[in-house]
Image (spheres, helix red, strand yellow):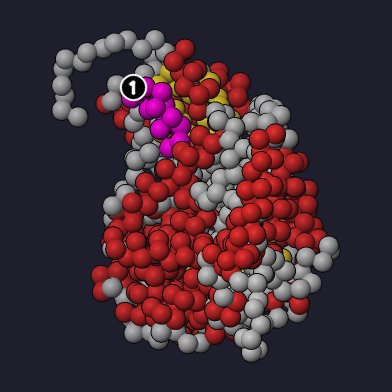
Amino acid sequence: MAKVGLDGHDVGARVVARGLLEAGMEVIYTGIRRTPEQIARIALEEDVDVVGISILSGAHMALVPKVRSMLDPSVLMVVGGVIPQEDIPELENAGVSRVFLSGTSVAEIAGYIQSAVSFTEETNEISDGH
Amino acid sequence: MPNDRQAPGPSDIQKAHQDWLERLYTPALDRTPERRAFEVDIGKTIEPLYSPASLEKIGFDYARDLGFPGQYPFVRGDSATMYRTEPFVISAYSGYGEAVECNKRFRKLIGLGVEQILVAFDLPTQCGYDSDDLMSAGEVGKVGVSIDTLADMELLFEGIPLSSVKRVGTLGNAIGPIVAALYAALGEKQGLDYSQYTVNLQNDPLKEYLARGTQIIPAEPAARLAVDPVVWCAENAAHWSPITVCYNHLNAGGAGSTWGASLALANAIHYLDLLVARGLPIDKVAPLFHMFPDERHDFFISVANLRALRRTWARLLRERYGAVATESLALKTTVYGHGQETLQEPLNNTVRIGFGTLAYVLGGASYVYIASYDEAVSTPTEESVRVAIRTQQILAQEHGFTDTIDPLGGSYFIETLTKTTADDMWAQVARIDQIGGALRVIDSGFGREIMNRGAQLRQKRLDSGQRPWVTVNTYPERPNVPNTAFRMDPATTERQHARTAEVRRTRDNARVQRALAAIDQACARGENQMPAVLEAVRAYATVGEICERWRRAYGTFEPSVAF
């Protein structure tokens, strides 16, 4: 779960992160005010299956595609926040799998992620210390 | 009155109340059960009925617990006359794009009857980055107007003397000394004496670390920077209100309005302690403080919260600081009228916001802002802003809402809520004292835990339907952000870059460098930043240049990753 840009409103990000944890997923939250580069690095280091971006500042068209372009193509990306209807196809063209608007239930988001990602029961035998 | 007559004793009314509950109310529930559990957002359970028995149970005493408006403990109002002489100040929080464009909106707002303008700055400005900083990509002019230098402020208030409105101001929570200096220098440019206009700043950095998130440097030095303009105002502009301790975002972020108030009061204590430690008398600085309450879920809790806050503030200032001046004890409040707004059918938000604002009016707020019905969707459009202002004017002038002072005073329900809420605030502030005060609330994770728990509880109440929300979990509709939402001219960013580049080229750069060096020196010596920052602002130093000096001196904040 990531906050990109200068938007510091992170109630939604925290609530969804906890909800996904309770739905049985392992969740990492980046904290607020991250650059696309920082998010890509954390995603790589933590070997994540899904990156969720929460954004309410209106800067989504400038920032979300930038994060997407820095992620491994195998990583699923979902976006939550206040996104005008006409921007949704553009974000999807840029490689966002799904846009969730404010007010979506956590169960709906969890359900989508569980259906879209085939979680493999990996046993990571290499410990890199983090 | 001689006590020779047997008034209905406490036990009689309590017995009568209990009797009603057992013989009439409860049996009726066997036939038709209650609709739902009546637990409000702050966690209290609302009784089916309040009566004199309720007041007896909590030991309510009119003279001690309420008094009269303008008298300790100020529950019934912060002044003797309240809205009878002047209704709340009609205010607008507004800003978008670039200063020239925004100026036109301000003129329209004033034309509609707005008496106070709080400028919404964009996120780069609030977070201390220039519009052409890499960190500002995509954010310039988005949630507010882009301000890089005093030149932008001059354009923003072109043809609007600061003295022509009751108050002007902004939030500027992480850049308090800079925004105070911008308004001081702008007044100078307009040929005004500081005494001829009134500036209101939020300038409350501590809550940013728990909610909202525009902090720049670590919390401890940020709090010191925030009190610098308070000291400066005490000496140069004592009628300004340079600090508004706010729980709007604390509540919205999950704390709820009672804990929100307590966390904010702890922040206020931290600022007040710093000021007292600098040798200022409490009755010189406390009058410069305002507070910004928030409760958007429950109407009656909101009324009670404002009344309880005034009481708790008065008690705190008297008992903890020995304040005696009425201006110190009588807390002025600023509010931002909200409801639980939806992306679904946004016009309905007009009703939600109207009721949310009415609660603040009935609670006796001094300065009232109000959300626009499309604010959950985007920067408000001209039409929605007009509706918001008219809503305030209707609340101030129609329906008789403001005819008598504290119209809900004496209600069994409201007084029970007010007293128990004030008791809760007092106990919570004591608990925060025990863990070491406002800075420990932030760095120990205590505050974050309260926020997270509350936010999750809210989500669960919505997901389970326990808390009805029309068009969201009852009569559900799909959320929809319409394409008609306000859109900024895409060339705004480039024009802002060009303007600031031109300012950097034409200003006296030697003077700017001297001024910035003076800021370094003030940081190193722990001196009040205001003189150095004011000189830098007058010399057209940018917001980013000044903040960069602070980042170098104090370091940057570490974002919390807890959830």
Taking depth in this image into account, of A111 and B427 the one nearest to the observer is B427
Task: Give percent across and percent down for residue B452.
Answer: 41, 43
Quarter where residue A15 is shown: top left
Q: Residue at x 60, y 51 (%)?
A: B47
Give the percent coordinates (x, y) of residue B135: 43, 44
Quadrant in the picture for residue B272: bottom left
Q: Is residue B164 above or below residue B399?
A: below
Task: Kindly identify the residue that appears in the image at 71 percent across and 59 percent down.
Answer: B358
State whether residue B522 appears in this view: yes
Quadrant for the N terminus of chain B in the image:
bottom right
* Image mark 1: chain: A
The one nearer the camera, B197 or B160, is: B197
Tell me, yes or no, whether the highlighted magenta stretch contains residue A5: no
In the rendered image, which quarter is residue B295 located in?
Answer: bottom right
Q: State the residue position of label 1.
A: A48
From which residue to which does the magenta span run? A14-26
Residue displayed at 29% across by 63% down: B434
Q: Amino acid at mark 1?
A: Val
Number of dots carrying numbers:
1
